[in-house]
Image (tube, coloured by chain):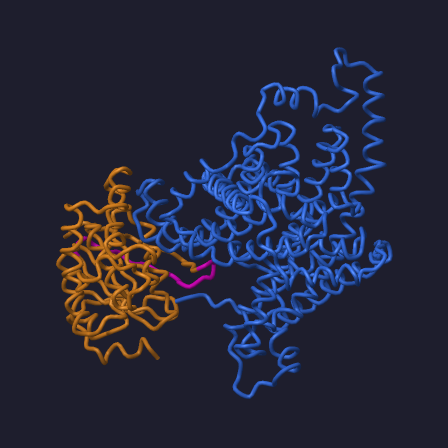
Amino acid sequence: MSSVSSISNQNIERRSTSLLKTSLGFLGLAVFLLIFADLEITTHDPWIELTRMLTGVITPNFTETENLINAIINTIAFAILGVSLACSFGFGLALIFQYRFVRISCAFVRAIHELFWALLFIQMFGLTPLTGIFAIVIPYSGIFAKVFSEILEESDPTPLKAISAETSKLSTFFFARLPDSLIHFKSYALYRFECGLRSSAILGFIGLPTIGFHLESAFAQAKYSEVAALLIIFYLVITTMHQWMRRSLLPFYIIVSLFILPWGMGDISLDNIMRFFTKDIIPLPLRGVEQFDSNVLVNFTSWFWMMISTQAWPGLLNTVVLTQIALVATGILTLVCFPLISPKFFNRIGRSIGYLFLVILRSTPEYVLAVVFLLLWGPSMLPAILALALHNGAIIGHLIGRYTESLKLRPDSPVKFNLYVFEIIPRVYPQFLAFLFYRWEVIMRETAILGILGITTLGFYIDSAFADLRIDRALFLILVTAMLNIGVDILSCYIRKHLRLSIKAETI
Amino acid sequence: MSRSLFELKCKTGRYNGHPVLHDISISINAGERIALIGKSGAGKSTLLQLLHQQSDNTVALIPQDLGLVKNLSVFHNIYMGRLHTYSNIYNLVNLIKPLNRELENVSNIADRLRLKNKLFSPVGELSGGQQQRTAIGRAFFNQGSILIGDEPVSAIDEHQARDVLQEINHRHETVILAMHDIELALNYTDRIVGLKGGRIVLDTPSQDMKANELGFLYQ
């Protein structure tokens, strides 16, 4: 006997209207924001640069990079140590995720991008492996904790009823809850490891000895054959990951990674760490203050107001503008891309080209795509929008394309465009919106980061503050960025709930 | 007169919040073997649920959805029937590497239910009938004197079903089963409780009944 939950026709209609309204709202907002967005192409001749790049792509040069093997191994080693530590911490935190303090702390650490964490840790530990590992471990732990706790929550509840209520909590957990979740933990950890490889590669752009370090200098010198070689190797590492990343080999990989990382590089001084906490991060007007009087308060207020009005607010506005446009562009690109790998639209040969296209876009970090487009068009929002839309559109497009495989159509269904519009889009649209809203927070985090490349989002001001060694300002702006991210996370959660859009957390 | 195990009197019984049962009054004594019959939606599962809630926690339960952990083996799922009687450490040891003593006990039951060659297969890979027998195995291993089962032999062929029902009666003192096969119900229980539209419309010893007299429950 079961209670049949009947959704009336009226309900379905109301839901699709609200899906449509929401989509149009976001689209309208993005179009409106385009008025304020700086989309200017400032480079002298983009075509010449593009020709050089394409020449580089077809003439990859694997011999030019010094220490190439080291850079690849370091990239993998940082990812292995960072992700496996974060996975263990995240699991521990998932078990106590019911406490509000744990949930808020996790939301906070994951709201700050790993590059910002790295910039902070550099102040403490210098360019040592510790900085790279921490930069991955801290935000990833927060992500793992959230997703693992969601997986545990979604585990099949029926065995709980079937065992005696007197069974201890521990035995219940290990027998009735963990086994069903374990397989999801594993697949999510593997996905996170792929993200970890990208994060690790990007950490090279701020000086750690990973692939990004060589990418940065190759881009700077316009050695595009070297760039192509580095990226090809990176794609190979990612696409073969499922073959070499085995649980049984993980302890071995961890030990090797520990030995391989260049611990001799830079040095950790206790003085630096002490100075960071007791001096650097304290807002300038409060530093060394012995007595808190009205003078200090006035100074601090004007510092605070200066930070808000000249940096935080303009940075925040640009971050929001760029995020909203990039989000909609991601959505449009997803809808264009997913048929490329769907058996409903293309045959095997067509699909394999589509796969290659999506895999390359999804494996290339947004940051690297943005560097490429910046070289083509100069610093404006245009390169950032395209980079974010291509990377995220490829990720969601891949998921939606795979999802269409399971759709069962009537034998006499229409073909091509009519199939797309009448049969497929209506079926995948809720799923598509769910993925897109999940990705919203990720896009915003990345938008802030792209500021480092000269686009005036929050990251631009943060990077400038670090460059001037004004750590107090940098930290203040990082906190503003984190708050903004948490805000978007809450908003996205609210919208998904309101529109009844749900997907399993571990699928993205 | 044997001791009374259940005294259930209620105006309305709810299933997922919806009222399903009305004006129920039933008492069950130790040693009785009862079949609840009636068409689907008549309230059998809800009545079993109410009885289970009333009982102390020594009942061996076979829920309709079986409550198996799909990624664990037949051994572990059967072993779970006795989790509450062992210490945590002992349970964890058996989760990782089954001890010989438990292995022997569990495989005796699995043997009886023709699951012995599947002892270490994940339950998710088994057929519906094999899964159902695993859930029955868990109830046997539990050793509770009362067994509550919701259609426990629905996915098993008739010949085996007879065997299993006999074994259930042999191992558990009091047995309360929801059943859809009237013939089996009459043969293996001694009291028939018929439900229709959420009300008990029949409560009689099995030996007084014939299969064709129960047809009205399904109309």
B73 magenta-colored = no
Q: Quadrant of residue B114?
A: bottom left
Residue drawn 78% across the image and 59% down it: A30
B120 left or right, relative to A207? left
Instruction: Tell how many labels.
Output: 0
Q: Main secondary structure of the magenta part?
A: strand
Q: Colour of chain A?
A: blue
**Chain B takes which shade in the image?**
orange
Residue B77's x, y, as percent?
27, 54
Which residue, as the protein is rendered here, is positioned at the far front? A63
Quarter the C terminus of chain A occupies: bottom right
Farthest residue toward the bottom?
Answer: A412
User: Any magenta on residue B18?
Assistant: yes
Report the side of B30 relative to A167 (left or right): left
Q: What range of the chain is rendered magenta? A: B16-31
Q: Position of residue B104 (x, y in %)?
A: 14, 51
Against A411, is B104 above or below? above
Q: Is residue A445 visible?
A: yes
Horizontal side of residue A402 vs A252, given as left or right: right
Q: Position of residue B163 (x, y in %)?
A: 14, 67
